[in-house]
Image: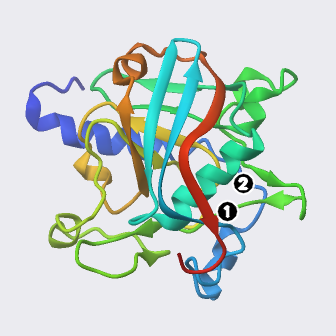
């Protein structure tokens, strides 16, 4: 069946989301266990971001800057800053780039893709393995609505009313966390939206936006590398509620 016309684009992107952001993952820990305890910065073992941070990604196509929003996604943005500081993203591969049949995402950040011994066919299956525990670090889905003091954790928002109230949405250039079908299974992999993707709002955690270098994102091809990620501004990490 061949789809055409603007009316088919949201449906195509939903299908891409199901096939491309969920299916490839193979996690090293049971994410569902996180749902049995309180979630969020107050109880997280991972640091949360206070305020904002600016991160530069040196890619094989050129530099990209992203502004991380710790005010609206403190746990997710804090996890990203921590991984940047650890050098987790250095040398990783943009293993999934989808522009056809509709512009969708550029996805990367799989720590295993930096290892030359990892087969290309396994790119997109890795998580960050915490060296202190030897287990995959998994963080819960974090979604905040405008006017609310704190994000909610662990449960997608799907109603049109709720998604219209999100503090961070999937606009072009949005940076968000990829995950498996478990909402609490994000780890290190992230993606950049190539155009507005409202059908993903409330289902995946947006935590920042590209502020410079979107033309570089547009030029990235599957197999290109994130040479180095570095923090260039802000990035105050705290334990507990920011």
Where is 22 relative to 157, above or below? above
Give the mark count: 2
Q: CA distance from mark 2 to mark 1?
A: 9 Å
Looking at the image, tell me whether mark 2 or mark 1 is earlier in sequence order.
Answer: 2
Q: How dense is the environment of label 2, judged by Cα within 10 Å: few (below 14), some, or many (20 and up)? A: many
The residue nearer to you, when weighing 69 against 168, is 69
The residue that mark 1 highlights is 138
Residue 59, labelled with which disc? none
Relative to residue 184, is residue 3 drawn left or right? left
Relative to residue 93, is residue 18 drawn left or right? left
Percent x, y of residue 65: 45, 32
Disc 1, SS: loop
| Residue that sits furthest to the bottom in the current view | 37
Identified at 77% across, 35% down, the residue is 112
Where is 58 relative to 172, above or below? above
Identified at 76% across, 45% down, the residue is 86
Q: Are marks 2 and 1 in contact (CB under 8 Å)?
A: yes
Where residue 240 sits, quadrant-wise, is bottom right
Relative to residue 230, is residue 8 drawn left or right? left
Identified at 19% across, 27% down, the residue is 3
Q: Quadrant of the N terminus?
A: top left
Percent x, y of residue 34: 65, 77
Percent x, y of residue 190: 53, 43
Identified at 51% across, 14% down, the residue is 62
Q: Is residue 183 visible?
A: no
Camera-side mark, 2 or 1: 1
The residue nearer to you, when weighing 168 against 178, is 168
The residue that mark 2 highlights is 27
Where is 165 relative to 230, above or below? below
Disc 2, SS: loop
Percent x, y of residue 219: 41, 13
């Amino acid at each position: 069946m061949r789809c055409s016309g603007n009316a088919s684009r949201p449906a195509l992107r939903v299908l891409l989301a199901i096939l491309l952001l969920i299916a490839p993952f193979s996690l090293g820990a049971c994410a569902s266990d996180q749902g049995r305890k309180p979630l969020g910065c107050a109880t997280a073992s991972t640091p949360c971001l206070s305020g904002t941070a600016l991160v530069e990604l040196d890619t094989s196509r050129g530099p990209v800057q992203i502004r991380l929003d710790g005010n609206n996604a403190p746990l997710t943005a804090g996890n990203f800053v921590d991984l940047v500081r650890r050098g987790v993203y250095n040398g990783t591969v943009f293993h999934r780039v989808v522009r056809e049949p509709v512009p969708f995402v550029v996805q990367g950040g799989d720590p295993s893709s930096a290892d030359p011994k990892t087969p290309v066919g396994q790119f997109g299956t890795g998580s960050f393995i915490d060296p202190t525990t030897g287990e995959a670090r998994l963080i819960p889905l974090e979604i905040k609505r405008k006017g609310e003091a704190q994000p909610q954790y662990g449960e997608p928002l799907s109603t049109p009313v709720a998604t219209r109230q999100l503090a961070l949405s999937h606009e072009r250039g949005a940076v968000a966390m990829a995950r498996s079908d478990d909402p609490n299974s994000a780890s290190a992999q992230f993606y950049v939206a190539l155009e507005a993707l409202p059908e993903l709002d409330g289902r995946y955690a947006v935590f920042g936006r590209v502020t410079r270098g979107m033309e570089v994102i547009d030029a990235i091809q599957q197999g290109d590398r994130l040479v180095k990620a570095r923090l260039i501004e802000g990035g105050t990490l705290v334990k507990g509620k920011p």
